[in-house]
Amino acid sequence: MSATRFPEQAFGAAPHERPVPRITIQAFCEFPDTGAALQRAGADRRLSKTQLNVQLGGIPAAAEYFQGQVTPNLLLVETRLAGLEALAEIDRLAEVCDPATKVVVIGRVNDVEFYRELMRRGASEYLVAPLNPLHLIEVISGLYADPQGHPIGRVVAFMGTRGGVGSSTLCHNVGWSVAEEFQINTTIVDLDLPFGTAALNFNDEPGQSVADALATPERLDDVLLERLLLKRGDYLSLFAAPASLERDYEAGLEAYETVLDVVRQSTPCVLVDLPRHWSPWVKATLIAADEIVLVATPDLASLRNTKNILDVLRQNRPNDLVPRIILNKAGMPKRPEIPAKDFAETIGHDPALVIAYDPLLFGQAANNGQMLAELGQKSPIVDGVRAFASLITGRKPVVAQSKSLFSLFGNKKRA
């Protein structure tokens, strides 16, 4: 699954989802709302590698501050003026700016001629306040994106809110549907290193695994990645876990980040199957994902854990959609459970999908090493998984399928 199979118009990360490289950013604003938008953008996960400093005073303060000092990689300056007066300020700033520094000007006037004059003077971009944090992130990312580079893939992280909720099974089935029914190149990355089930659920046996990549992440490139992946047809690949207890797994945060960065360089859709334990790298991987899917069951422990995880993610992902919730194993006989409506009221938004308890269907698929849809049975569960795949990709199946049960979807309160 090399980069040559990742065409420009393929499914992948949106412009505002591309992470910004390690750069220094200095901002000099004139108005409080601009400063607030800059601070909100600076708290975003996509700017986590940058060093952002926001000050007041606008262009005059920036020109004075950098007298005899090296200017940063990126300089954001706001002006309350317009026309020739604003251009005169920019000219004074240019006298102290290093040639390598990119300058983004923020103003209050939507004037095409003013924009053209700024571009002639070497400004990188002109933004009209009030600022939208996501648009600002998209602009900054675009300034540092390689114009000759390939698009990057979209990372969707799956995590169970307690043991046995079926997160891995659903991750694998959604990944299979995205690949086989939507024909989007997809890689499932199984990061439950000692107990992962990706290879088992697909009836395969990994030779090398994702643990080998994590051990020496600096060696991972497209060529090595091709050797490590298990191919499952034209569109699906598995980055399987070793599922072995004979070795210790002590990779650090940067190793996981590096491996996922390499995978998303060559695959439009990356589904990450996370283990159900809370650790620094699990938290960091969740926060960095483009989309998050939490799988829960309708019981009190799962409800508590779901709410706690959502609270952490809302704090660390202020500009992102809240995670999608799948409520699995609903309607289990003789088991008291929390109704889906009450579950939704407690966590603050509706589950995206509610899956009925069906041990026969899931058990048969697991024992055969098959996906649910491969059993050939007409089931609301299969239709629901397919509809969920459509929801996270924004696409419709390429191959002819039965009508999806979109009535299963809620998410009226996604923010």
Image (cartoon, rainbow, N blue to C red):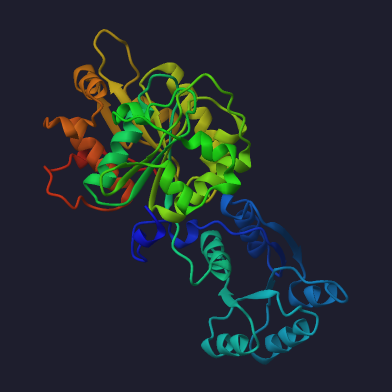
Q: Is residue 46 left or right of residue 234?
A: right
Count of numbered badges drawn on the protein: 0
At 51% from the left and 19% from the top, the residue drawn is 245
Q: Nearer the viewer, residue 176 or 297?
A: 176
Q: Position of residue 45 (x, y in %)?
A: 58, 49
Q: Position of residue 132 (x, y in %)?
A: 53, 63
Instruction: Answer yes or no: is residue 151 visible.
Output: yes
Q: Nearer the viewer, residue 63 or 402?
A: 402
Q: Position of residue 201 (x, y in %)?
A: 31, 28
Q: Is residue 192 left or right of residue 331?
A: right
Quarter-of-image position of residue 60: bottom right
Q: In the orientation shown, which residue stands out farthest toward the right?
A: 68
Quarter-of-image position of residue 111: bottom right
Quarter-of-image position of residue 180: top left
Instruction: Answer yes or no: is residue 315 visible.
Output: no
In the rendered view, tell whether residue 14 sits above or below residue 85: above
In the rendered view, tell whether residue 165 sits above or below residue 145: above
Q: In the orientation shown, which residue stands out farthest toward the top?
A: 334
Q: Nearer the viewer, residue 343 or 331?
A: 331
Q: Position of residue 308 (x, y in %)?
A: 53, 28
At 68% from the left and 77% from the top, the residue drawn is 79
